[in-house]
């Protein structure tokens, strides 16, 4: 451009501020104000993993009320008189996520671990809800059935 300044770059756009606010709101709705979660089952446990980067472990609060498990946490903003924000996209404040737990879980044995910005909840399946075999008993005498004809079996039993 040889020293010529393109004035189109400096044009005052009255919608630029609104567009910026909408972009921030959409980004917060998609990622910021809710905790990303993975949920899966292993043999005897359900595992829930929540993304919580930058959250102090002391701010994490987990409550169970009947069959509703609530996870709350907060992330504080950087504070100081010398800070001049250039970009501020990370959600700050308190956020929460609720899970409706089904029956058959042992909520008294839920464990929580917070490592590298990920909260992991292990929710065990109650013993009475685990798959099990039921044995069949028989009140009469036990007989071995081996595929021989019933006439042979009766003759062997008589002998």
Image (cartoon, rainbow, N blue to C red):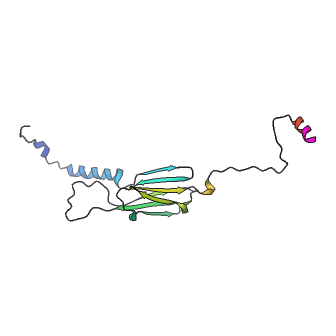
Determine whether, in the image, residue 146 is placed left or right of residue 15.
right
SS assignment for the magenta stretch, majority = helix
Q: Residue at x 18, y 50 (%)?
A: 14
Q: Residue at x 24, y 49 (%)?
A: 19
Farthest left residue in view: 3
Task: Please say whether residue 64 is visible from this viewpoint.
Answer: yes
In the image, the segment drawn in magenta is 154-159
* Relative depth, front residue between 142 and 19: 142
Task: Please say whether residue 101 is visible from this viewpoint.
Answer: no
Q: Residue at x 21, y 54 (%)?
A: 86
Q: Residue at x 32, y 53 (%)?
A: 28
Q: Residue 23 in the image: x percent, y percent?
A: 28, 49
Determine whether, in the image, residue 119 is placed left or right of residue 46.
left
Q: Is residue 157 magenta?
A: yes
Residue 12 vertical placement versus 155 (above, below)? below
Q: Residue 109 in the image: x percent, y percent?
A: 54, 61
Q: Name which quarter of the figure residue 93 lies in.
A: bottom left
């Amino acid at each position: 451009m040889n020293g010529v300044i393109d004035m189109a770059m400096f044009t005052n756009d009255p919608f630029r501020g609104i567009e910026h606010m909408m972009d921030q709101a959409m980004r917060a709705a998609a990622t910021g104000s809710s905790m990303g979660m993975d949920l899966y089952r292993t043999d005897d446990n359900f595992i829930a993993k929540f993304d919580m980067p930058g959250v102090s472990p002391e701010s994490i609060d987990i409550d169970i009320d009947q069959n509703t498990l609530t996870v709350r946490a907060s992330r504080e903003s950087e504070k100081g008189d010398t800070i001049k924000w250039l970009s501020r996209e990370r959600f700050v404040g308190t956020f929460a996520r609720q899970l409706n737990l089904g029956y058959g879980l042992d909520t008294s044995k839920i464990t929580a671990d917070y490592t590298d910005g990920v909260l992991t909840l292990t929710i065990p399946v109650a013993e009475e809800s685990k798959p099990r075999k039921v044995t069949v008993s028989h009140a009469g005498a036990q007989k071995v059935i081996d595929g021989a004809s019933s006439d042979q079996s009766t003759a062997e039993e008589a002998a």
